[in-house]
Image (spheres, rainbow, N blue to C red):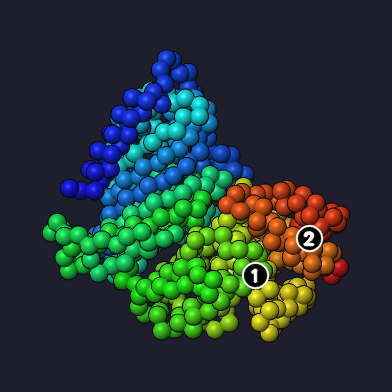
Amino acid sequence: MDHRVLRRLAASAVAALFALTGCTGGGVVEGRPGASGVRDPFFPKAGNGGYQVEHYDLDLDYDPVGGRLHATAVITARAEQALSSFNLDLSGLQVERVTVQGAGARFNRTGNELTVRPAEDLRRGEVFRTEIDYGGKPKHVTDPDGSREGWIPLAGGQGAVGVGEPVGSMAWFPGNHHPSDKATYDIEVTVPKGYEAVSNGELRSRTDEPGDGGAADAAGGGGRTVFAWRSAEPMASYLATVAVGKFKVTTGKTPSGIPVHTAVAPGEAAASAPVLGRLPEMVEWGSGRFGPYPFSSTGLIVLPEGTLGYALETQTRPVISGAPTGEEGEALVLHELAHQWFGDSVSPKSWKDMWLNEGFATYAEWLWSEDHGGPSAQQHFDAYLAGDTDVDPAAGSDWYAFPPAAPPGPKDISGSPVYGRGAMVLQRIRQEVGDEKFFALVRGWAADHRHGNASTADFTAYAQEKTGHDLKKVWDVWLYGKERPKAP
């Protein structure tokens, strides 16, 4: 039996249980529509109002040769108001069927908004299950800065990768696609035998199944393999990933026992080995600098060169294109691993707060250099001020073009000031308060906001409280100042 049919039978049983136990309640519920966006300052239509997702259960069946996806998403959410309808973000794919609490629901599409109208209004506080059958050929989304995200095929029908920063996850599954709504995930991926399917969290099972004789089976020489992944820690949807390919997979553990799962495109394996060999060391180093590693597994996905024009800190398993080699590749991997603390565990409340992700990850590069015989964080800071690219190649960028906490628009959230000047803000705090208070601040920030969301205002208030210093001048000049800062 098709495992999607089994899911539908299970959903029907759950709906019957709801009815028997009275969980859906009786009487009249005067619901109102949930908002079609959370009014993010840069992506106002991202996310949706009226509910918070608790869990995503995604069942994806992908044909790498034909490029078609057949999928079911079961979304468990809690209504934050009485709802007559609610929205999900979904781009491009065709919706075949929607149920809410096991009953058929009406739905319609407008742009990237899927509006769902349950058979009965949902009560405030009610936990409800929505099941969506959908499919088609997923497409990429083009960011305001021109980069591609969403569902990206690998060359030659060799697979695909799903990446989502900032809003590309809506290209491969329906959801509440804003970082302010985190959830746990189960992601099951069916692919032709011979392909690997890698996702976030832990691999719960890998099961070979006989094929049905279709084109997808022929791509793998007959039969299919089902990979079941689970992310038990909360995750923002832009950090979810699925990579399908004929990867070389390696597993192991860090010295402290954290499972490591890496997947590397065959043509990148040999060149990647030296840097990937240091990944466990990097995780242990980060745990010493920033506090305990915030997730139950780690790893990396290395795609064929040129698949993406960037690396992404997808939770527990960052994605990069091409083999990371030499000092530059080492810094890149370290940067994405540092995001597991800053960006993945402590996620931004809005896309305007991106410096809290990128400034911290860039500063982690400086600290790694400082601790491993390279230029110190202060030397990196000075190099930026002087434009000294011999010390830091990024020092020649326009790091002063705008304040890191006030990027002008959505195309700027990955701009140089968000990274370099964001890191300089942290070094200025260190200069003001000294090493002991600074590193206590960094570890406390990661611990006290673990698996949550935070804004720039949250950070500035936290830094002043924890250090006991008046840091207003740092904020005015380095974080929000429009003029190019000068040496303190």
Distance CA(mark 1)–CA(mark 2): 27 Å
Within the image, what quadrant is residue 229 found in?
A: bottom left
Q: Which of 433 and 156 is in front in this view?
A: 433
Residue at 67 percent of width and 69 percent of height: 289
Residue 341 screen position, x and y as percent: 60, 61
Task: Check disc 1: other Cα within 10 Å, few if <14, some if 14-19, many if 20+.
Answer: few
Q: Which of 308 and 271 is in front in this view?
A: 271
> Which mark, by number, is residue 248?
none
> Which mark, by number, is residue 288?
1
Marks 1,2: beta carbons within 8 A: no
Q: Which of 131 and 479 is in front in this view?
A: 131
Closer to viewer: mark 1 or mark 2:
1
Residue 299 versus residue 94 in the image, above or below: below
> Which mark, by number, is residue 478?
2
Residue 292 versus residue 5 in the image, above or below: below
Within the image, what quadrant is residue 85 found in?
A: top left
Residue at 16 percent of width and 59 percent of height: 211
Residue 294 screen position, x and y as percent: 56, 60
Residue 374 versus residue 148 in the image, above or below: below
Q: Can residue 65 be seen in this view?
A: yes
